[in-house]
Image (cartoon, rainbow, N blue to C red):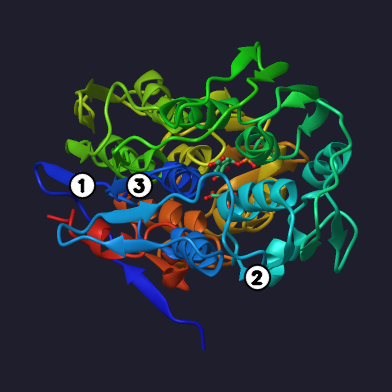
Amino acid sequence: MTESITLAPRSLKAHNTVALPGSKSISNRTLLLAALSDNECEIRSLLKSDDTDRMLEALEKLGVPMQKTDSGSLKLVGQSGKFPNKQADLFLGNAGTAFRPLTGALAILGGDYHLHGVPRMHERPIGDLVDALRIAGANVDYLGNEGYPPLQIHDFSDKQVREIPIKGNVSSQFLTALLMALPLTGEAWTIRVDGDLISKPYIDITLNLLKQFGVNVENHDYQIFRLPENATYHAPEIVNVEGDASSASYFLAAGLLSGSPVRVTGLGKNAIQGDVAFAHELAKIGANVMWGDDFIEVSRSPEQKILPFDLDANHIPDAAMTLAVVALATGAKCSIRNIESWRVKETDRIAAMATELRKVGAEVVEEQDAIHITPPEKLTNGAAIDTYDDHRMAMCFSLVSLLGVAVQINDPKCTHKTFPTYFDVFNGLSA
Ligand SMILES: O=C(O)C1=C[C@@H](OP(=O)(O)O)[C@@H](O)[C@H](O)C1
Ligand SMILES: C=C(OP(=O)(O)O)C(=O)O
C-alpha cells in the first residue's frame, strides 16, 4: 500500500523562518565542474538529496576523490578535465541535472560508459543533446528507444567541426550540457540555438558557474554562445551553494496564503537562480515581499485579497507549479502558459496537475502548453492527492492545508528527489 500523510487544516505561527536546503541546480553543476577542475574545491551547503546523491555516486565511480569535512562541507579533488575511470556503469535515477550534463561531458571525453535511470528517465527526451554531440564527434548509442536513455557512450572521434546547432525548445539542460562539456576539448566553439530556447534563467546559472570556474562564455541574446579556446576549469577555493529557489516557492507561497510572514534564508536579492522571480509574481497578486542579502520574506496584509493571474511562466517552470495551487485562493480563473516542458519532467505535470486540482474541486482546462484553473467556491475536504513520483506535486499540494481544508498526500517520500525533510519543515510552520 502506498504510504500517505494527512495534513490537517492549519494556520501558521506569527512568524516563521526556514533555512533552505542547497540549490539542486547549483549543487549538481558545481560538483561536475569541481570534478573537472585542475585543483581542489570545498563545497559548502551542498544539497543532500536523491538528485545530488546520484551525481556524487557517478563521480565516485568515475574516480573523483572526495571527502566530507568535519564542518559538513565536501572537498573534491579535481581531475584536470578528465576522469580517471574510462569505463563505468552509471545509474542516475531521475536527475536531469545529472543525466544531461554527464552525458555531455562523458561523450566529449569519450570512454565506455553506460548511463541509465529510473523508468521515467527513460521516457524523458535526450535526442536533441545526442544529435548535437554527434556533430562534434561523439559516439553515442541508444540502448532502448531512439532519442531516449539508456545510453551507451563510446570513444570520441574529433570531426574538426567547431560550430554546433542545438535545439532548446524541449529542455534547456541540453544547452547547459554542451556549455559545460565543450570547454573540455580546449578548442574554441560556437553554439547556435536552433529555434526557441526555453527556461533561459537556467542558462544564466550555467554561465555564472562557468565563469566562477574560470571559463567566460559570450552570450549573444541566447542565440549564439562563443566558448574560448584553451579553456580549463579552475575551481574557487570555496563554493557556497545558495538555498534552492524552487524549494523556497512553497514557503513563500505559504506566507501569501496564510498571511503570516514566512522568511526563507540561504538566498536573497543577489541570487543567481531564476526561480526567485516567483517572489515577484507573488508581489503582483497581493504579497508583501521583503528582499535581504540572505533572505526573502513574504506576508500579506489582512485586507489584501489574493488576485487572479494570467502568466507566461516559461522562465520559472518549476516554481510555476506552486502558482497552480496558489490559484485555488484567488477566487477566479487563472492561467499558466508556455509550459509545454511540464509534459516531459518527472511526470506529465500538466496532466497530473489537472487531475489532482480537480480532486479539490477546481475546474481545469488543459492545453498542450498551458493550464487554466478556476477555483471552486468551496474546496473539497480531505482530497487524496496522487503525486506520480514527482516531488513538486507533493510539495505544492501541501499548501492546500493552508486553505481551510485537510489534504492527504500520497507517497510523500517522493520529495527525496530534492527535499527529503520537506514535510517535517512544512509541519514545523504550524501554529
Ligand atoms: O538546468 C537546470 O538546473 C534545470 C532546468 C529546468 O529544466 P528544463 O530546462 O528542462 O525546463 C528545470 O525544470 C530543472 O528542474 C532544473
Ligand atoms: C524538472 C525537475 O528536475 P530535473 O532536474 O530532473 O529536470 C524538477 O526538479 O522540477
Amino acid type indicated by mark 1: Ala
Numbered badge on residue 88: 2
Q: Is residue 304 visible?
A: yes
Q: Which residue is mark 3?
A: 40
Q: CA distance from mark 2 to mark 3?
A: 23 Å
Query: Could you tell me residue 366's position as x and y percent?
Result: 72, 43
Q: Which residue is mark 1?
A: 19
**Mark 1 or 2, closer to the camera:** 2
Query: Could you tell me residue 44's position as x and y percent?
Result: 26, 47
Amino acid type indicated by mark 2: Ala
Q: CA distance from mark 1 to mark 3?
A: 27 Å
Q: Are marks 1 and 3 in contact (CB under 8 Å)?
A: no
Amino acid type indicated by mark 3: Glu
**Mark 1 or 3, closer to the camera:** 3
Mark 1 or mark 2, earlier in chain: 1
Within 10 angstroms of label 1, few (less than 14), some, or many (20 or more) residues?
A: some
> Compared to 184, does 138 lie above or below?
below
Q: CA distance from mark 1 to mark 2?
A: 36 Å
**Mark 2 or 3, closer to the camera:** 3
234 relative position to 142: left or right: left
> Compared to 272, does 17 lie above or below?
below
| Relative depth, front residue between 65 and 170 | 65
Quadrant in the picture for the C terminus: bottom left
What residue is at 66 percent from the left and 17 percent from the top?
A: 222
Query: Could you tell me residue 132's position as x and y percent?
Result: 82, 38
